[in-house]
Amino acid sequence: MKTISITLILAFGVFAEPPRAFNSLCSYLEEEKETVSSLGNTKKCFARYMPELENEGSTWAQGYSGCQKSATSERQSMLTNASEAQEKIREAALSMSSYIDQCLTLTEPMDFFHCFARMSKLQLTNVYNISFNASEQALILNQKLGTIEVEHYLCTNQTEHDYVQGTDKIFRSLDQCLQQIATN
Ligand SMILES: *[C@@H]1O[C@H](CO)[C@@H](O)[C@H](O)[C@H]1NC(C)=O
Ligand SMILES: *[C@@H]1O[C@H](CO)[C@@H](O)[C@H](O)[C@H]1NC(C)=O
Ligand SMILES: *[C@@H]1O[C@H](CO)[C@@H](O)[C@H](O)[C@H]1NC(C)=O
Ligand SMILES: *[C@@H]1O[C@H](CO)[C@@H](O)[C@H](O)[C@H]1NC(C)=O
């Protein structure tokens, strides 16, 4: 989806105004000065510069997919790293949960009360530990996601910048090539 819309934006960016090369081709043809040999030269201009344009296009596609891949793999690595902390918190929470479950099974009132009385001291630090670690992890994940997004933006922006500059240079050369024929 994103690839398609960006491709469209680029296509519009490049073709929104008719490239000067096409303008000069049109005025050149309108002047009706074309001869078989000058048309042959026109074809030579296109034959020379069209592959370069295609090349720019495939460089852009490769760059763009590289940006996507690195963002995806960084996200994956971040989630893999986070799963360790997640597992620790899960274990801590489960141990509390099983402590409570075990207290709940006690039918003898004295055992029951003692069990829950001990819980406050033992488990409360655990609750704060879980809460503290969980807040910290959420903050870290959020920051890392932000960093990955910024990196991804810079990567695609650079790729687009290179593409626009590259095609602009080729269009200028093509334009020049066509104008040389027109004036000869
Ligand atoms: C994942 O952890 C490794 C080693 O701790 C670290 O080098 C890497 O940068 C981490 N990746 C992310 C995305 O946080
Ligand atoms: C909380 O984080 C500390 C330090 O990283 C770690 O030693 C501890 O096991 C963690 N505890 C829980 C419940 O996640
Ligand atoms: C959480 O408990 C672990 C040991 O179970 C300890 O190493 C860690 O420092 C504690 N973290 C906090 C934030 O108290
Ligand atoms: C993105 O690219 C444009 C032009 O291609 C440039 O002017 C702008 O500074 C770039 N933005 C960033 C954040 O690099």
Image (cartoon, rainbow, N blue to C red):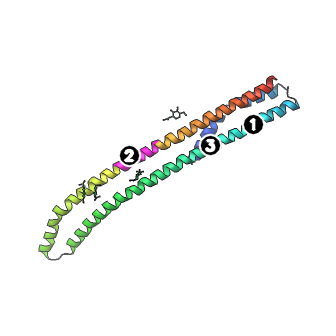
Q: Relative to 120, is 90 on the left or the right?
A: right
Q: Nearer the viewer, residue 155 or 106?
A: 155
Q: Main secondary structure of the magenta part?
A: helix
Tag 2 residue: 143
Marks 2/1: CA distance? 48 Å
Which residue appears farthest toward the top when viewing the image?
183
Q: Secondary structure at mark 1?
A: helix
Task: Identify the disc placed on residue 48.
Answer: 1
Residue at horizontal 82 percent and vertical 24 percent from the top: 31
Q: Height in image: 107 above or below 33?
A: below
Q: Tell me, yes or no, whether the highlighted magenta stretch contains residue 145.
A: yes
For the residues marked 3 and 2, what is the alpha-carbon distance in whole angstroms? Answer: 31 Å
> Label 2's element?
helix
Q: Nearer the viewer, residue 144 or 102?
A: 144
- Image disc number at residue 126: none
Pointer 3 residue: 59
Cβ atoms under marks 3 and 2 closer than 8 Å: no
Residue span colored magenta: 139-150
Q: Is residue 168 left or right of residue 72?
A: right
Residue type at mark 3: give it: Thr
Percent from the top left, x then y, of residue 99? 23, 69
If the image is split into quadrants, where does the C terminus sit?
Answer: top right
Q: Where is residue 86 drawn, in percent x and y?
A: 35, 59
